Amino acid sequence: MVLERKLVLDDTDTYCPVRATLALLGQKWVPHIIYELMDGKRRFNDLAHRIGGCNSRTLRDRLKNLEDLQVISRTIIAVMPPWVEYELTPKGRQLGQALEELQRWGKTYMVEPCI
Amino acid sequence: MVLERKLVLDDTDTYCPVRATLALLGQKWVPHIIYELMDGKRRFNDLAHRIGGCNSRTLRDRLKNLEDLQVISRTIIAVMPPWVEYELTPKGRQLGQALEELQRWGKTYMVEPCI
């Protein structure tokens, strides 16, 4: 399951693309992963290091999800030892750009803790 | 409580404005409320009608939250019978604009159900 069913359906139980987008971004680490990949491709370990605090298994799950949604692509570099590289697809880059607007808003207006 | 504590803290338990923004938008009906107010001010009943499916109590809660966060303003029109009008603040309009980018992305790329 890529996204939680109840988060992507509207009140008439119809699939809503905008809700699906928010559900995707609401998954812990997802915005951070996209943000880190905006600079270019990254190996798994490098990504794990930069993100910090996300365990490997969760990171692998999130990356798999994002790959299934074609937000990122995964390339195996077959040298010895082989490694895996992740990169935003054009679709992923556009999501990153849309996210920057939201990030800018948050950093301007949500600076004081709202809890 | 305006936003759920665990949704706005990062892995080092520090408040994160970007997470707070996503937590706000992840609240059911919030993007819809902002969207409806992008056209201009609305009375409570008009808003409830346009949003549809959200009960009055939940809508009132969400509007109160958005008012506390200064995303919307609430004006009482003191004629008989009095009514209440809601309007986006400049901060709220900017959030609406940031959301449009995300909405555009979702409508372009998340059209197929991802569940």
Image: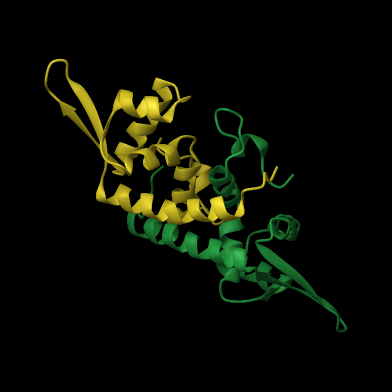
Chain colours: A yellow, B green
Left or right of A61? Residue B6 is right
Relative placement, left or right, of B31 versus A16 is right
Occupied quadrant, residue B42: bottom right
Image quarter (top left, top right, bottom left or bottom right) of the C terminus of chain A:
top right
Name the outermost residue toward the top. Answer: A81
> Which image quarter holds the N terminus of chain A?
top left
Marks counted in the figure total 0
- Taking depth in this image into account, of B20 and B37 the one nearest to the observer is B20
Q: Position of residue B23 (x, y in %)?
A: 58, 45
Which residue does the image show at 57% across and 27% down from the upper left? B12
Q: Is residue A63 visible?
A: yes
In terms of depth relative to the viewer, which is nearer, A2 or B66?
B66
Q: On the picture, is A84 further left or further right than A95?
A: left
- At 13% from the left edge and 16% from the top edge, which residue is drawn? A80
In the rendered image, the residue lying farthest to the right is: B80
Q: Is residue B37 above or below residue A46?
A: below
Who's the residue at 31% across and 42% down the image? Answer: A39
In the rendered image, the residue lying farthest to the bottom is B79
Inspect this view and state whether residue A60 appears.
Answer: no
User: Residue B41: horizontal and vertical position, in percent?
Assistant: 66, 76
Residue pictured at 37% horizontal, 41% vertical: A34
Task: Work out whether residue B53 or residue A19 is closer to the camera in this orientation and state it.
Answer: A19
Q: Position of residue A92 (x, y in %)?
A: 32, 47
